[in-house]
Image: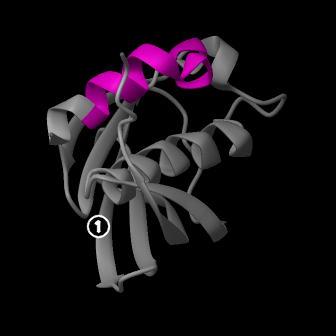
Amino acid sequence: MQQDVAAFIAAHDAFINLLGIRITEAVPGRATAVLDLEAKHLNSFGTVHGGVLFSLAECAFGVAANAHGKLSVAVNCSITFTKPGLQGQLSAVARETSKGPRISSYAVEISNDAGEIISTYQGLAYHRKECFPPQRG
């Protein structure tokens, strides 16, 4: 089921495909998303745009939450930028820090090629009753 979540998101999320984000791990409560930086990801200062970092973290968070098999949506999230991203590959690793029947908490760390954490993200997911990925007929 977990690979189905990653495959479903990769096939149906046009935005992460536009950015070039790839899901490399998807298990309940944990996910990894990676991004090879290109010029289109940089802001006018030559560093990774904050919106790109947020999107990368949001992707990992969403996959980790939905890998439990229930449709999960963000109800709150925040990000802290601690170091500029410049080039190479970024990895966002999401891990569940608290799991409840309806609300779960996730921490995401984005690191660069050198393993330095450049951003941290905190998210709360609301788990709905519907199954994820949706059954297609």
Q: Tell me which segment is drawn in magenta.
A: 5-18
Q: Residue at x 51, y 41 (%)?
A: 56
Count numbered badges in the picture.
1
Q: Residue at x 48, y 43 (%)?
A: 59
Give the x, y percent position of residue 123: 54, 70
Q: Main secondary structure of the magenta part?
A: helix
Q: Quadrant of residue 43?
A: top right
Question: Which residue is under mark 1?
Answer: 95
Q: Depth check: 54 or 128 in front?
A: 128
Quadrant of the drawing holding the N terminus: top left
Residue 78 is left or right of residue 66, and the answer is right
Residue 95 is left or right of residue 79, and the answer is left
Q: Depth check: 45 or 118 in front?
A: 118
The verdict on residue 11 being magenta is: yes
Residue 88 visible in the current orientation: no
The verdict on residue 47 being magenta is: no
Snapshot colouring:
one colour
Disc 1 crowd rating (10 Å Cα; few below 14, some 14-19, many 20+) is many
Residue 85 visible in the current orientation: yes
In the image, residue 39 above or below residue 46: above
In the image, residue 70 above or below residue 79: above
Q: Quadrant of residue 133?
A: top left
Q: Depth check: 112 or 128 in front?
A: 128
The amino acid at mark 1 is Arg
Extreme-right residue of the structure:
44
In the image, residue 129 above or below residue 87: below
Give the x, y percent position of residue 79: 63, 65
Extreme-front residue of the structure:
137
Give the x, y percent position of residue 50: 71, 46
Disc 1 secondary structure class = strand
Give the x, y percent position of residue 60: 40, 48
